[in-house]
Amino acid sequence: AIRGNFFDIAACVEQPEQLGAQLRHLPDGLLLLNQGRIAWFGEWQQGAALLPAGTAVTDYRDKLVVPGFVDCHIHYPQTEMIGAYGDQLLGWLQRYTFPVEGRFCDAEHAENISAFFLQQLLSNGTTTALVFATVHPQSVDALFTQAAAFNMRLIAGKVMMDRHAPEALLETPAQSYQQTRALIRRWHGKQRLGYALTPRFAPTSSPQLLAQVQRLRQEFPDVWLHTHLSENRDEVAWVKELFPQQRNYLDVYHQYGLTGEKSVFAHCLHLEDAEWQCLCDTRSSIAFCPTSNLFLGSGLFKLQQAWRRKVRLGIGSDVGAGTTFNMLQTLGEAYKVAQLQDYKLAAGEAFYHATLGGARALALDSHIGNFDVGKEADFVVLDPAVSPLQQLRYANSRTLDEVLFMLMTLGDDRNVYRTYVDGKVVFQAPQRQEAA
Ligand code: GUN
Ligand code: FE
């Protein structure tokens, strides 16, 4: 049993104005766990009587317990190249990304980076992610094997690509089909793991490759589809050249049946009206990746437009184009992206996107995203003030809203005190000297 200061969002919303009524703050709450699930959630006053005599109670009343963060777009093989200097998307891929991904033909390398990557997720409070691997099947095996050991809810897939990358990273459409099919059968639905068909993006996909993705989607209608869409202006122009028949970038995917409720498109920065409409009509989702969009100089995501069009949306770190695994820092950058467009991203809305909203974007909101009874017990215990500056600011914060906003502007991985997955502690902060 866990007694603590809890915050979550009770239900999904269609408009930001509806969020206020759904914010749930229990300064003295009780969370009962049973076999990795939430068995009871409510006020300590009401719940204490339910506890069998002698039940151990962990007390987090001086912390802030929130649902585990959901990262809707990240590349695990790019962990060791975060912060690569000087290029925008297309140059960055050639100069930094493809060479680093080439190393994942070595299964041992894939195992080492998988272990490091999962530790980074957990030590940052991220308990679910939608993950790009590389073109090599062993890159997926390595990641899923280790995520299964934590019983994490994780979705991943092998990159599919057959052109416009170095020879060593290319495959034929037939190979791509066969290897992806074998991975789906091995991993999809095993424990809490899910498989995502992962064509890298339109420029590295021939029409024949996209036809194989479509074939797999028809064969396995339950798997996810994860790709990039309209990130960079040169990329958009290139897609127009490569696919002159299609009306726009999204249409390349849509024509192959790759839009839909379990489709997640990263970035979506330079969409035409018809593309917004198509995302809406097909109930597809967006991963908004603020640190990546700023770092690669890709553009400013139109958050307000996503609300207006009622397109489901989650937050992605997009490591290694993104510059942090940390969702608090990522939300802080999202706030600045919105500021540059005269939209005010309130803390409650930001935390919604990073938890329940992200879960909904991944069609996982019946499993994770808040503390509803029956949901899976993945959550983070945040220490609200870990540095002298944070303590000063915290002492000057009167409402929960101010504390949340302080966390997204000044917070980082130091604020993650413990992370729980499947009801168990999977990360614990090292002992720290008392600050101040
Ligand atoms: N578009 C195609 N591949 C990639 C990638 O690895 N990272 C980002 N940010 N965009 C891409
Ligand atoms: Fe990406």
Image (cartoon, grey):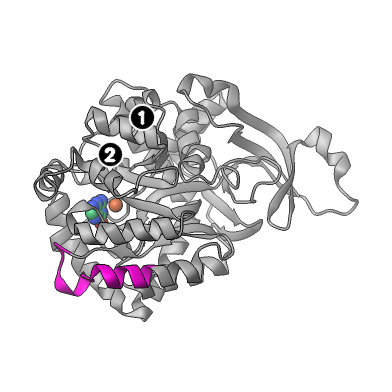
What amino acid type should be assigned to the residue bearing mark 1? Answer: Ala
Residue ID for mark 1: 306
Give the extent of the magenta segment.
163-180
Q: Residue at x 53, y 55 (%)?
A: 432
Q: Position of residue 87 (x, y in %)?
A: 13, 52
Ligand 2 has an atom within 8 Å of the beta carbon of the residue at disc 2: no
In the foreground, 395 or 231: 231
**Quarter location, residue 281:** top left
Q: Residue furthest right?
A: 53
What amino acid type should be assigned to the residue bearing mark 2? Answer: Cys
Observer able to see residue 335: yes
On screen, residue 350 versus residue 174, left or right, reads right
**Quarter location, residue 198:** bottom left
Q: Which mark is residue 154?
A: none
Observer able to see residue 75: no
Label 1 environment density (alpha carbons within 10 Å; few <14, some 14–19, many ≥20): some
Residue 370 sits above or below residue 418 on the image: above
Residue 113 sits above or below residue 126 on the image: below
Q: Residue at x 21, y 35 (%)?
A: 270
Q: Residue at x 60, y 35 (%)?
A: 7
- Is 169 part of what is drawn in magenta? yes
Residue 415 sits above or below residue 44 on the image: below
Disc 1 element = helix
On screen, residue 75 versus residue 412, left or right, reads left
Residue ID for mark 2: 268
Q: Position of residue 204 (x, y in %)?
A: 19, 58
- Is 355 part of what is drawn in magenta? no
Disc 2 element = loop
Q: Residue at x 15, y 72 (%)?
A: 167
Q: Decide: marks 1, 2 in contact (CB < 8 A)? A: yes
Q: Position of residue 225 (x, y in %)?
A: 38, 52
Label 2 environment density (alpha carbons within 10 Å; few <14, some 14–19, many ≥20): many
